[in-house]
Amino acid sequence: MLQCDVLIVGAGPAGCAAALTGQRLGLNVVVIDKATFPRDKCCGDGLTTLALRELEKLGVEPTISSWVRVEDVFLRSPAGREVRLTLPSGRGQYAAVVKRIELDAELVRLTTNNGVQVHQGVAFDNIELTSRGVQVSLQDGNIVLAKHVVAADGMWSPVRKALGCTPKGYRGDWHAFRQYVKADGRRSRDLWVWFEKDLLPGYAWSFPLADGRVNLGFGVPRSKDVNGKQLSTIWNGLLERTPIREVLGNVEPEDSRTAWPIPARLPKAQLATGPVLFVGDAATATDPMTGEGIGQALESGRLAAQAIAAEGPNESAAAIYERSARTAFQVDHQFSKTLSNVLAKPMLAEVALRAVNANDWSRRNFARWMFEDYPRASLINPRRWRKDLFDTRGAWAVQN
């Protein structure tokens, strides 16, 4: 039987963030993951300022081979208006794109190199809450006895299911689709977002990677009005849409299309049960307006480890984590959900983008807001205001 302070189920961004943070706080941490890294993960591959700052805290360097620093963002409104957003220069990185297969492998490598036991190719089987702690059975027959468990095992969380607290019938809040393609268009080296009328409040994207490749995809909210046949039709015609073709030029698909559900209902989520804490997609922590989840995964993993380290006789880790995670995410998620409902209407989306395009200040700060340089709801919540709200540095600013 293996014993530890914290067993982390899942070695993605949330799990590795929890492992690295916990190890640095003096906890005995063990990580298991059913996959063997490197392994692909269906994702848009975009990194916001929030994600970049969390990665910097963990010790990740922006030197991964597919890493592309993003400085300009191009939006296309429902009526065809093009808006160019320029992120601050010379103050660090505010946005980037990197293939998840490489990012996750680097996080696992960093976690292992920092002395954490990472068991790859080892799957979770069952969990039992006992008087001695949490007893976890693994599919290879081994048993782990831990004081706490961090479930970083994705939207379908086997840990949550084994504990009997999976929301009945829940299948995610967004549909997302991705394919890697080679593109020779001159403008394909920029990051593009197309707000097409039939996708609102969703959008299509092209995120540039190294070697002339892009991550091409689209995301739409899950709705009874959108079925599989309609989604397939959108996919089949995506590269034939004139605005997208004009940017990408000649394209050559590199792999098959992939799809995945996005969980974005943190305000309704159960974040802990006893000594088990849920993080990342297992906590449904994705932003409900953009579908971005890497930054939220990293931050929630860090908060979970900090809560476990701070546990005392008067307050449990679950209570500490619940409070810190709600403080970090709850209001912003509610605000994003409200904005998403507004942007579902093409006319209102057009008005919003016209306002964004008013001047250099509005364009620059909307870009920073969109990429989570500062909290979503800070626009309406004076308690989140601070003197440097519009003057913060990006990640790895010292290197610039």
Image (spheres, rainbow, N blue to C red):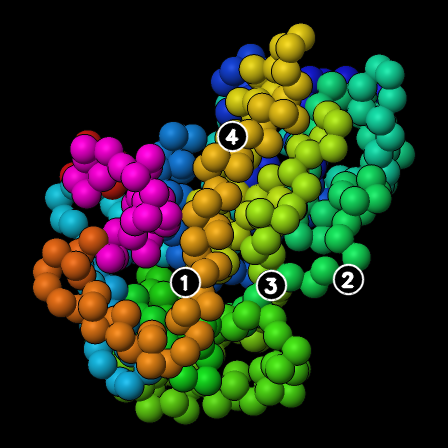
Instruction: Read off the magenta span.
Output: 366-393
Q: Position of residue 278 (x, y in %)?
A: 65, 38
Label 2 crowd (10 A; few <14 / some 14-19 / many >=20): few
Q: Residue 173, which numbered label?
A: 3
Q: Which residue is mark 2?
A: 169
Placement of 348 over or under 109, stated as above or below: below
Tag of residue 324: 4
Q: Which mark is first along the chain, 1 or 4?
A: 4
The N terminus: image quadrant: top right
Determine which residue is flagged by label 1. Answer: 339
- Which mark is nearer the camera, 4 or 1? 1
Determine the secondary structure under disc 1.
helix
Mark seen at residue 309 = none
Q: What is the x, y in percent for residue 314? A: 64, 10
- Asked whether the viewer can see residue 306, the reply is yes
Q: Nearer the viewer, residue 84 or 22?
A: 84
Q: Is residue 15 in the magenta section?
A: no
Real-space Cα separation, disc 2 to disc 4, in angstroms: 28 Å
Q: Residue at x 57, y 75 (%)?
A: 256
Residue at 30 percent of width and 39 percent of height? 382
Q: Is residue 157 left or right of residue 104?
A: right
Name the amino acid, label 4. Ser
